[in-house]
Amino acid sequence: MYVFVSVFIVVVGVLLTLIVLVQNSKGGGLASNFSSSNQMMGVRKTTDFLEKSTWILAIALLVLSLVASMTIPRDVEVGNRSAIEEQIRNAVDPSQIPEFPSSLPQNPTAGPDGTGGQE
């Protein structure tokens, strides 16, 4: 459903862009090309159609955006988790790691055999 709505959003966005580019705020644009008196739709009807279609497409884009936000898939699948998320969840707390004895001798004057005397 989300993909279906997303495709409609893209189509409505492209149509809205095209209709806005056709319009001219000063009365020119596509409407100025139909100034002939024998046309079925006059200049005024063309501008009315473009204005109404702009409003309809803008409202449709708003509604489709709201519908898309409601239909976003929110199911969390265990198999699709990222490796970083798994590492964070399985991380060991550093304060819980035991300290291992070091391999250095306890007595700094001890010899290689650990007796403490010099040879």
Image (cartoon, helix red, strand yellow):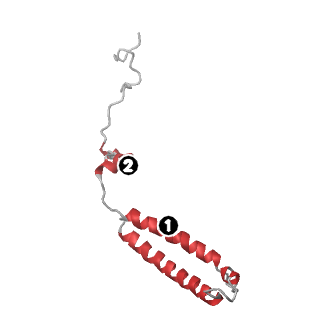
Front residue of this view, candidates 3 and 89: 3
Q: Position of residue 100 (x, y in %)?
A: 32, 33
* Number of dots carrying numbers: 2
Q: The C terminus lies in which quarter of the figure?
A: top left
State the residue at coordinates (36%, 50%): 85
Say which of marks 1 and 2 sits in front.
Answer: 1
Q: Mark 2 points at which residue?
A: 82
Kind of element beneath mark 1: helix
Query: Taking 95 as reference, is 20 left or right?
Result: right
State the residue at coordinates (38%, 19%): 110
State the residue at coordinates (70%, 86%): 36
* Structural distance between the alpha carbons of marks 1 and 2: 29 Å
Q: The N terminus lies in which quarter of the figure?
A: bottom left
Front residue of this view, candidates 82 and 30: 30
Amino acid, disc 1: Val
Q: Name the residue under label 1.
A: 10
Residue 72 - label: none
Q: In which quarter of the image is residue 51?
A: bottom right
Q: Position of residue 58 (x, y in %)?
A: 51, 79
Amino acid, disc 2: Ser
Tell me the crowding category of disc 1: few under 14, some 14 to 19, or many 20 or more residues within 10 angstroms, Cα based. Answer: few
Tell me the crowding category of disc 2: few under 14, some 14 to 19, or many 20 or more residues within 10 angstroms, Cα based. Answer: few
Q: In which quarter of the image is residue 7?
A: bottom left
Q: Is residue 6 above or below residue 83?
A: below
Q: In this view, does 111 lie above or below 34?
A: above
Q: Where is residue 88 in the image (x, y as percent from the top left)?
A: 36, 49
Query: Taking 74 as reference, is 54 left or right?
Result: right
Q: Position of residue 21 (x, y in %)?
A: 64, 75
